[in-house]
Amino acid sequence: MVIKLSGLTFFTKHVLTLLTVFSCGLMAFIVKAQTIVPSTLTAEEFSELHQCDKKFAYDIYFLGKKVGYLHRTIQWHKNSTSPQAVITSYGEVSFLWIDSTYQQKSTMQYSPQYQHFLTASFSQKLTGIKARAMKTKMSANGLSSTVTLNGEVSHYQSINESEKQPLYDIDSLGAQIRLNLLQGKVHFNLSRQASSRVENYQFEVAGLEVIDHKKWGKLTTIKVIEVGEHKDIVLWFSPKHDHQLIKAQLDMMFSPVVWLSHFSRQCEQ
């Protein structure tokens, strides 16, 4: 990477990759030796595993310098037969003359019928080099979407439609990863609705790794890697922090790194 316009565009692209794909603080990991939940969750099990309100703050670093942040909140609305979560995110990145912001709001729910999470809709706004305004509405089964990108409407279908694999936004993607890992899965494919295409991810659990965190010291984490098209992505989850995503980066010589700096949750007793 060189520090010129093309290099800065490259930098911004991959910071936004981390912001939009791996700022998903819903993600968690329960090691294989622990009790595995059944594939069909009762209402009580679902509430215990998923329905805490949570707040996250992530700091973004490049070449050792803090260049941005991401804040996220997850709030569950449980006054219906089908509880929904509303997730809001806001982030900023500033590097040399680049200033970019990221905003997203999404609504998702767990489907007892399909036994996985579904996105109802989400909206996203980015400013800077890769500026865009995006609104997406998913079909009831999650297999198709209607995307309005900068005023232009497009329609998409799931890559794995024959397998009834839905399209996720970043927030429901994180929730589904969490559920898969709670069920003891170590290899799985998921599809995400990006701005102008459907992206497929192949995740694999790589094992335990000790990392040194500026705030919390040495932590034993679970390392997860993407082994498909996005194979440069590496993720670490901390069992001491609700098994949340604590670090994310691209496996490159010069790579932005995202670190969890604050996490809190509130669960009904």
Image (tube, rainbow, N blue to C red):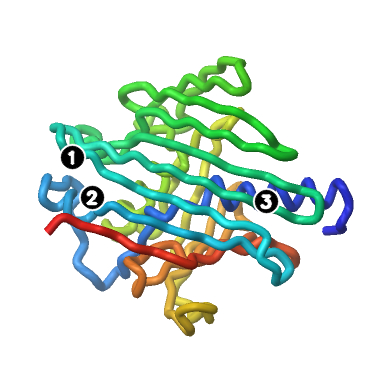
Indicate the amino acid at tag 3. His
Q: Write down the residue under mark 1.
A: 78
Asked if residue 1 lies left or right of residue 130, the reply is right
Residue with the most extreme bottom position: 218
Q: Secondary structure at mark 2?
A: loop
* Circle nearer the viewer, 3 or 1: 1
Question: Label 1: how many residues lie within 10 Å, few (<14), some (14-19) or many (20+)?
Answer: few
Indicate the amino acid at tag 1. Lys
Taking the spot 49% from the left edge, 67% from the top edge, the residue there is 261
The Cα–Cα distance between marks 2 and 1, rounded to whole angstroms, is 9 Å
Q: Any mark on residue 14, and which? A: 3
Asked if residue 211 lies left or right of residue 174, the reply is right
Q: Are marks 2 and 1 in contact (CB under 8 Å)?
A: yes
The Cα–Cα distance between marks 2 and 3, rounded to whole angstroms, is 31 Å
Q: Write down the residue under mark 2.
A: 51
The Cα–Cα distance between marks 3 and 1, rounded to whole angstroms, is 36 Å
Indicate the amino acid at tag 2. Gln
Taking the spot 64% from the left edge, 30% from the top edge, the residue there is 132
| Residue 111: x %, y % from top left | 23, 35
| Residue 100: x %, y % from top left | 68, 45
| Residue 219: x %, y % from top left | 44, 80
